[in-house]
Amino acid sequence: MSRAFGIDLGTTNSVIAHLVEGRPVALPIEGSPIVPSVVLYTDGGAVVGREARNLELQMPERCVRSVKRKMGTSHRYALAGRELTPEQVSADILSALKHGAERATGEPVRDVVITVPAYFDDAQRRATLEAGERAGLHVLRLLNEPTSASLVYERILAPEAPSTAEPEILLVYDLGGGTFDVSVLEVFHGVREVRATAGNTHLGGDDFDDKLLQLFLDELKASQGVDPREDIRAMARLRRLAEETKIRLSADIAVRVREEFLTRVEGKPIHLDLEVRRRTFEELIEPLLESTVALARRAIEDARLEGQALSRVCLVGGSTRIPRVRALLEEAFGVDIHEEVDPDLAVGLGAAIQAGLLTGEPVERILVDVAAHSLGMRVIGEEDRLGAEPDTFAPVLRRNTVLPAVRVEEFYTVVPQQERLLVEVFQGEAPRVSENTRVGAFDFKLEPRPASSPVRVEFAYDLNGVVKVSVSQPGTTNAKTVALSVADAGKAAQAAREQSAVERKARALLERLAPGPRAELERLLGQYAAAEGSARERAEEALLDFFLDHEAEPREP
């Protein structure tokens, strides 16, 4: 049998992949492995992908996007003098993937595995098969998207999985551009059984874009008294702007949105100019995200695990890059969250693995470098007592994040005109910093601002175990960057454990000493607690000497 390919026919983007030396590789189409699922119809035929997406701003009335949401329905598109079914539009996307892969590999593309949402019904699956046939493809199998992604994660997680006779329970959370799927899988010695699925075929990144689009429309109405809904070109530009803003807010805490000459009203040009904060965006989409968590809980209930525990959550789909998604899942399930695979490519790569397995190609392990521990800061939390040293750990860069990586979070000042901030960096998974490992600290002078003013914190973690911590105040030029070695944190943790052992022994001795030696030991313990660096080592030696000299002393009567 000839080589087979895997295709993720996505709502927003599509991917085609194959195996290279046993490892799945997404093929570049027009320079990128991610192909926008946008089709523009001209008098000369169909234009697909990035070019169609670019031309959409000029000819939105000739474009189709998010066709996956119409699969299996009687919907018809009237474009360029033609009436088109969703199956035909999808076939045009598949044809573009087929021809692009043929150009990239020099091989014919015929046998394919195409992925579909686990929640697709029979009509939607038949429509996908018909689209494949119209594109001249032989569909070996329709593969559920969460199952497809699990094939990739299995080849990353398996080497670190403990040798056990117990099966592992995975939850694959797939939040894409237009659909949401969640599946509970039982994996045992390479065999995967889907225990339960749930989802919403009309929930995804498009809906998050709609929330931002409405925000833009409200701003135009409030500031300029303009409603451009009847201007299809203006709406196309606003929708594109909403998508770009959403993507940028996954990487930063605030985005300045500017779009000039959006439209004209009575000859007057209309511009859009506003700042959107990540916090505002998260508030807009919170109900939608909470609905996905509710569906995930339902899938776990339907799986009837009966004593088995969920062990991992694997993230799939570009919308899982939104930081609030991971935070909600951690709060809900309290297990490791895995994002080692590019969420835009995971389903397509899994489809390539399945295609290889069906055609007898060898499939190898996949190795990636990830953060072994979460990195974050000491902050004041709700559980911290007033007047006591704050002990809340706020993760910025999470465990299992693929390296190199950059993550940004927003924190807030505590008091009016706050003058400084002690940035203390820790690594670990405990919610309290006292239970994690201290990586380093530095002072950051603040410009005077009201209480609850934002402070931007960025962690940039490289493959050498160095994290660059950048702190800045939005709206000012005040900024500072410090490099800290995470590789040295393990040594520091070991030293701290050894030091604490000496301290514990010394404190245990206190209760049986006479008043004179007890006062001396309390003085030494105070010096030890206040000392740092080489001074702390000398203080530890003094503690140890005292302990050895007085260990055998009898308890005072």
Image (tube, grey):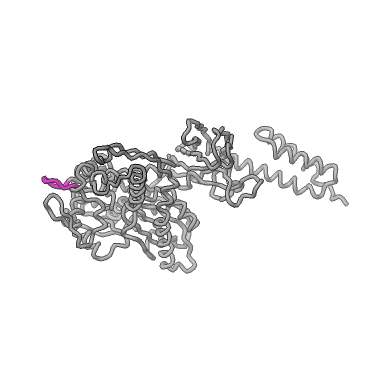
Q: Which of 270 and 360 is in front in this view?
A: 270
Residue at the far top in the pictured view: 477
Residue at 64 percent across and 44 percent down: it is 389
The answer to which quarter of the image holds residue 538 is top right
**Residue 104: x and y, percent?**
22, 42
Residue at the far front in the pictured view: 266
Q: For this view, does 286 lie left or right of residue 447?
A: left
Q: For this view, does 497 lie left or right of residue 162?
A: right
**Residue 391: x and y, percent?**
61, 47
Q: Nearer the viewer, residue 471 or 549?
A: 471
**Residue 24: x and y, percent?**
31, 48
- Residue extent of the magenta highlight: 40-46
Q: In which quarter of the image is the N terminus?
A: bottom left
What type of secondary structure mainly makes up the magenta span?
strand
Residue at 78 percent across and 47 percent down: it is 509
Q: For this view, does 13 lie left or right of residue 157?
A: left
Q: Can residue 544 be seen in this view?
A: no
Q: Does the magenta stretch include residue 97?
A: no
* Picture mark count: 0
Q: Is 295 drawn above or below residue 230 in the view shown?
A: below
**Residue 295: x and y, percent?**
40, 62
Q: Can residue 256 be seen in this view?
A: yes
Residue at the far right in the pictured view: 557
Q: Nearer the viewer, residue 273 or 458?
A: 273
